[in-house]
Image (cartoon, helix red, strand yellow):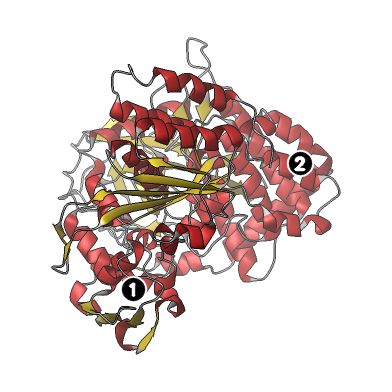
Amino acid sequence: MTSGENPRGRGVPRPLSGGPLKFGPFLLEARLAVGGTAEVYLAQPLDPGAQPRKLVVKRLLPHFMSDPEGRTMFEREAALHGAVSHPNVVRVFGSGSVGDEPWLAMEFVDGCDLFRLLRRLSSGGRTLGPSVSVHITRELLLGLSSAHTARDPSGTPMAIIHRDVTPSNIYLSTDGRVKLGDFGIARSATRATLATEGGAMLKGKFAYLAPEQVASEPFDQRADLFSTAAVLVEMMLGRPLFAGSGQLAVLLAIRDCRIDPLREARAVLPPGLFEVLERALARDPAARFPTAMDLSQALEPFDANPAAARAELGALVRWVQSAPSTDQMQAVREDALPPRPAPPPVQPHTPVASAPAPPAAPPPPTTTFEDEENESDRNTSEYAPIPSYVTTASGGKLGPWAFARLVEAVATGQIGRGDHVDFMGRGPAPLMAIEELARFLPAMSAATTNRVAAVGSPDFADDVSLEALMTVFLSVLESDATGVLFAEGPTESRRMTRAGDVLGETGRKELYFVDGKLHHVASSNASELLGEFLVRRGKISRTELEFALAVLPRYGGRMGDTLIALGLVPSLEIFRAIRDQGSDRLVDLFQWHTGTLAFYRGQTAPHVEFPLDLALPPLLLTGLNVVDPNGQAAGQWTARIDQAAKRPRPVR
C-alpha cells in the first residue's frame, strides 16, 4: 500500500541500501512510497506472534517531526483509521512512537492500488469494463459505509469523512479484494479540522473533490460519495471525469459539475447506469444518494456476478504485478528526498533511542504536470525578458515594458483596444490581435467613457452611497438579474509602479452579474491584481511574486497557473483566492465615499476564464459590516437580504 499525497514509486518495494533496519518493534525491509508528509515501509514485527508476518509501517517525514500540526494530523489519522474495522478497509494493527517519532502499523495488501492498475490499462489502450468497475465501487462503498457509521468507545457516532477517495487510496489484492486506505486527511465532523483541502490536496488529488469542497461550502459524507462516483466513471472511461487545460480549469469543471464525458458515453453504458451516476454526481448534495449503502444498492443491478468480477480483478492485479511498469522504472531513480541516515548497528531486542533526524529540508515543490520541470529551481536570469513597446491611439509612445508591466497596463485600462503593441519583438500589431494580451482587456472598458453609445441608457444611475449600492445590489438579488454595474470612483492616490511610472487615475470597476450572482469583476486598480492580493494575504512573499512575474510569459500571462507550476501556492488555494479577490473587489465599493454608479440590466456577461458564481447575500452582509461594524444603520437592509437569500431560486 502507499501513503499520502503525491507518492513516488507507488507500491513498488525498494530495498533499503543498508539492509533491513530495526525501528522500534519492527524490522523495516523496504520502502514502498514517499508522500507529502510521510513515508511507508514494508516491515515485519520482531515479535512474530503479535501481528502478521508482513505489514506496513508509516513514519512521519523528518521535517514534519517538529511541526505540531503535522504530528497532530498523524495522530488523528491513527485514531480515526483505527476506529474503523471492516474487511474493505485497510486494517490498523497499532500505533505508537519510537523515541519522539510516531508510527502507524497497518495491513499489507499484496497487490496494487487502483491508480497503478488504471495506468497499466491505459498504456495498452484498455479500460475496466462496467461489471468490474461497479464491483470495485460497491466493495469500496462497504468500506466507506463502515467509516461513515463508526462510533467512538463511548458509542457516539464519529461522522468520519474520508475526504481522499481517489484511485491511489483504493487497494486491490491478488485475490480480487478491495480495500480503502489512507485516512491521512480524514476528519470527524464532531471535531475541528486542522488543515484545509488547500494544504492537503496536492497534485492529482483535487480532481476528485466534490463541488461543495471546491466552492468552500459546508460538506459532509456525501462528498465522499461524489468522489466515489467520479472514480467509477474514470474506471469505465479510462480517463478522469473532470479534465481541463490546467488545475484551475479542472476545479472549475468540478465546481460547475460539468460531466460532459459521462454524457457522451451514455449510449455505451448498461441501461440505467447513467441515471444512477448522474444522481451520485449531482451538484446539490441533497439530490445525491444519502448514504454509501443507498448508492451501493442502486448499483447492485450492474454487479450481477460478483464472484466472476472478483476473479477477473484478481487476474488483472496479478498481471500488473508481473509486468514491468513505469513504477518499477521510477523506483530505480533517486528520490527527491534524501534517505534517512542509518543508525549504528544494534543487537536484536536491544532497546535503542531513535536516531536523530537530519536537518529539516523543505519538501520539493509541486508542479502542474507529472513530467514538468521544476520551475522554482531556475534562476530569473534564465528568463531575460524581451521588452514590449506601446503606441497609443493618440500617437503616444510607452515602454520599454516587461511582460508583467504590460499585462498590468491592459488589465487596469491604461492601454486599450485602440492601441498597438510591439509585443516582445514581434512587430507592431493591434492589441486586440495579440492573444496573450487581449484576454486581459476589461470586457467593456470603452463603455465606461461612452456608455450611451456602447450599451444605451442605464436602468439605474446615481452617485455612490450606501443607499445607492444597496438599491442596485438588492434589485439584482431579488430579481435574479443579469447585467453590468459600472462604478467610477475617486482619483486614486498617485503611486509609483514597478516600472517607475507615476499614476493618478480614476478608479473604475465593472461588475457583471448572471442570474443574480456575481459573475466577474474587472478593476482598474493594479493593487487588486491576483499577485498583489496574494502578497497582502500572506500567501506569497514579495520576492516570490517578482519571480513569478519573471516567468509569467511561459504560462500565457496566467498568474494563477504560474504560481501553481512553481509550487508556491496549491491549486485549491489559488482557486479560492480568485473567488476571494472577486469578493473583495465588490466589498471595496462600500468604502467609496464619492463616485458614480450605472447599472445596465440584461447586458450579457463577457466570457471569462474564471466565472466567480458568487452568491450576493454574504457579500452584501460583509460590505455592510465594513461601513457599519455595530450594525446600527444596516438593520434596514439585512431583513431584505435574509428574505432574498431564503427565497427559492429557479432551477436553471
**Looking at this rendering, what residue extends furthest in the top direction?**
154
- The C terminus appears in which quarter of the rendering? top right
User: Could you say where residue 330 lies in the image, as x and y percent from the top left?
Assistant: 43, 67
Q: Residue at x 47, y 13 (%)?
A: 153
Q: Dot 1 lies on which element?
A: helix
Q: Quadrant of residue 278?
A: top right
Mark 2 and mark 1: Cα distance apart in space: 44 Å
Kindly identify the residue that appears in the image at 53 percent across and 58 percent down: 455
Label placed on residue 276? 2
Choose between 160 and 386: the one closer to the eye.
386
Above/below status of 447 relative to 640: below
Crowdedness near tag 2: few (<14), some (14–19) or many (≥20) residues, C-alpha within 10 Å: some
The residue depicted at 21 percent of the width and 34 percent of the height is 100
Residue type (three-letter) at the residue carrying disc 1: Pro
Q: Secondary structure at mark 2?
A: helix
Q: Residues within 10 Å of mark 1 (few under 14, many from 20)?
A: some
Please identify the quarter of the rendering in which residue 412 is found: bottom left
Q: Are marks 2 and 1 in contact (CB under 8 Å)?
A: no
Asked if residue 191 lies left or right of residue 364, the reply is right
Type of amino acid under label 2: Val
Q: Position of residue 501 (x, y in %)?
A: 16, 67
**Which of 214/559 is in front?**
559
Q: What residue sits right under mark 1 in the picture?
A: 553
Q: Which mark is residue 257?
A: none
User: In the orientation shown, which residue stands out farthest toward the right?
Assistant: 271
